[in-house]
């Protein structure tokens, strides 16, 4: 039995074979949530500082979006690194899947 879980392996495979838009992009498992009270560009993360502007690209669909870290989440026990607002999830083409491997690049700091 492999010590790797499917999202990590999938992330490595996709980041190896998919065209990478950013040299410093980092594959991250993300979910979306519909209740962000901070607006349509809202991203929740424990890893990035509040106010950090992120370029996001869905490795499966190739679709991109920009978001700003305005909230904390997802819960650490989930294993996910980002929650994105519903409008960003729509732009990334991940609403029906619910979860996606996203390339993340910091494009602005607070």
Image: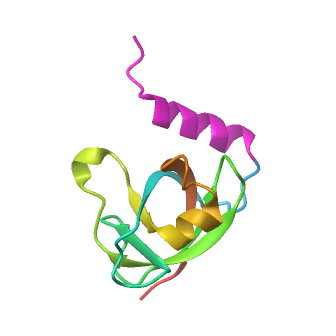
Q: Nearer the viewer, residue 55 or 75?
A: 75
The vertical placement of 78 against 35, above or below, is: above
Q: Residue 27 location, x and y as percent? A: 54, 51
Name the residue: 67% across, 46% down. 60
Q: Is residue 12 magenta?
A: yes
Judged from this view, the residue extending furthest toward the top is 1
Q: Is residue 79 magenta?
A: no
Name the residue: 46% across, 84% down. 109
The quarter of the displayed image where residue 37 is located: bottom left
Q: Nearer the viewer, residue 67 or 35?
A: 35
Q: Residue 53 location, x and y as percent? A: 50, 80
The vertical placement of 87 against 76, above or below, is: below
The quarter of the displayed image where residue 24 is located: bottom right
Q: Is residue 65 left or right of residue 18?
A: left
* SS assignment for the magenta stretch, majority: helix
- Is residue 105 at all visible to an observer of this figure? no
Q: Is residue 18 left or right of residue 52?
A: right
- Is residue 108 at all visible to an observer of this figure? yes
Name the residue: 49% across, 68% down. 86
Q: Residue 46 location, x and y as percent? A: 30, 65
Q: Is residue 89 left or right of residue 4?
A: right
Label count reads 0
Q: Residue 30 location, x and y as percent? A: 45, 54
The quarter of the rendered structure image containing the C terminus is bottom left
Name the residue: 49% across, 81% down. 40
- The span picked out in magenta is 1-18
Q: Nearer the viewer, residue 2 or 69?
A: 69
């Amino acid at each position: 039995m492999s010590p790797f879980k499917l999202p990590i392996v999938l992330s490595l495979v996709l980041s190896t074979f998919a065209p990478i838009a950013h040299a410093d992009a980092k594959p991250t498992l993300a979910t979306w949530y519909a209740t962000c009270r901070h607006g349509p560009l809202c991203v929740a993360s424990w890893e990035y500082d509040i106010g950090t502007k992120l370029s996001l690209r869905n490795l499966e669909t190739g679709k991109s979006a920009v978001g700003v870290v305005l909230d904390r989440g997802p819960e650490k026990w989930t294993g996910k690194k980002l929650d994105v607002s519903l409008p960003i999830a729509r732009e990334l083409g991940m609403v029906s899947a619910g979860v996606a491997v996203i390339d993340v690049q910091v494009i602005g700091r607070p």
